[in-house]
Image (cartoon, helix red, strand yellow):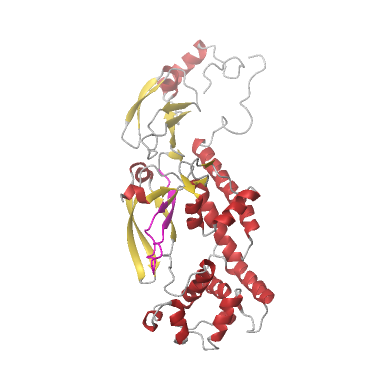
Amino acid sequence: MKYKDYYAALGVPRDADAEAIKKAYRKLARQYHPDVSKTADTEAKFKEIGEAYATLKDPEKRAAYDELGRRPQGQEFRPPPDWAHEFGADNQSFENVDLSDLFDMLGRRHRSGAQRGPVPMPGRDYETTVRVSLEDAHRGAKVNLNFEDEGGERTLEVTIPPGVTEGQRLRLRGKGGKGRNGGADGDIYLHITLAPHPVFRPDNHDLHFDLALAPWEAALGAEIEVPTLDGPVLLTVPPSTRSGRKLRLRGRGLSNGKGGHGDLYAIVHIDMPATLTERERELFKELAAASHFNPRAVAAKENAS
Amino acid sequence: MTAAAQVAWLDARETVSVTELSRVSGLTPAELQELVEYGALAPVQRTQVTATLVFSAACVAPLRHAVRLRTDYDLDLFMVGILLDYLQRIEDLEKQVRSLKAQLPKHAHAPHHEGPEPWHEPHG
């Protein structure tokens, strides 16, 4: 087992009182918290001070730690023989045990009031963010996740069920680190984010997309082939469709994983040719002369979206 | 166990018992009870048979986050309740922003959704 200098990690003298240790820790925690600081060594540093504080704030653990004496950081050492007895481990197995796990165990034993003997240690939980495409969210997918484990890098294939949405949290039971001494296996927590899609914008299980119409399509109505995640379908644009109107295709949105589907919304906007041909100009002029339509009149609101 | 049975959806469509929530959050049932008393955690129902508390699975992620911050900054349980409230509000607001963004057309001229109403002639 490698010795770690917990006092040095917090930058406090070995005779610091509880209040000084707490203060030193909080100051460092603010500085190195992964939510605040994103530099490369932050995470390791934060883990180091957290581990140091977890032991030094607890009088019992601190006394046990002090019992180990003062050693150089990283020095290999064997815990006192009675420790092995205390934790029900033989000296052999201490070699692969991290010092922090030992103090963890001490705390757990204390809380549970367990007798001497092997202490059940639950496996580690893992949390990770997974970015999936809309198509994968819709149909489900297998993704490979990489984890840093006690035994190094580990790749795990996990199945994302159909129906996940942006921000969805999933818990994969028992897929985390293995428990020891009869402790339960850990879990994996997945935080799903969706990769931006070139066409669709998801809102929960509904999808929105922009549908461009020519003025005459909006005026006369049209049958238009529009994309869905399951292939193109025909959308009926009713006559006199205004810009901004939402046309709903029921059940053509994302699968919700429980047998249902969200809806698909086409948001209409009316586009114009960048330049008109001579003939188009003539026709529009003719239309302008023939029509009494005034879009700025209060009454012209039948086609509310 | 099937693959589907191992996947728990941590959203309002599923529930967790107080025992399960205790396991996943690392808080004791007594601490969870205290959060309920503070009003920070709201049980969805009491099961008839055992009268134990049942919670929406949507609280699992923010609760784990709040508990992690408790450890990280050495906070007390009352603070966990406060954090839980804020974390859930942030999540709700993010959801609303995403929803509004999805409904907003991409093209620049989007007067139907924000800003002043289109101008109409008073006597058109």
Queried whether the magenta region covers residue A182, the answer comes back as yes
Q: Quadrant of residue A61?
A: bottom right
Please tell me whether the stretch drawn in magenta is mainly helix, strand or loop.
loop
Q: Is residue B85 above or below residue A98?
A: above
Query: Which segment did they paint magenta?
Result: A171-197
In the displayed structure image, the side of residue A164 where residue A62 appears, left or right: right
Is residue B102 visible from the viewing direction of this image? yes
Q: Quadrant of residue A127?
A: bottom left
Q: Is residue B15 above or below residue A17?
A: above
Residue drawn at point x = 57 percent, y = 19 percent: A295
Instruction: Provide residue B9's location: percent of width, then percent of height.
Output: 43, 47
Instruction: Provide residue A7's location: percent of width, then percent of height.
Output: 59, 81
In the displayed structure image, the side of residue A175 where residue A296 appears, left or right: right
Residue drawn at point x = 67 percent, y = 72 percent: A23
Front residue of B81/A31: it is B81
Front residue of A101/A34: it is A101
Instruction: Provide residue B23's location: percent of width, then percent of height.
Output: 48, 57
Q: Is residue A237 above or below residue A112?
A: above
Front residue of A166/A184: it is A184
Queried whether the magenta region covers residue B73, the answer comes back as no
Residue drawn at point x = 32 percent, y = 36 percent: A230
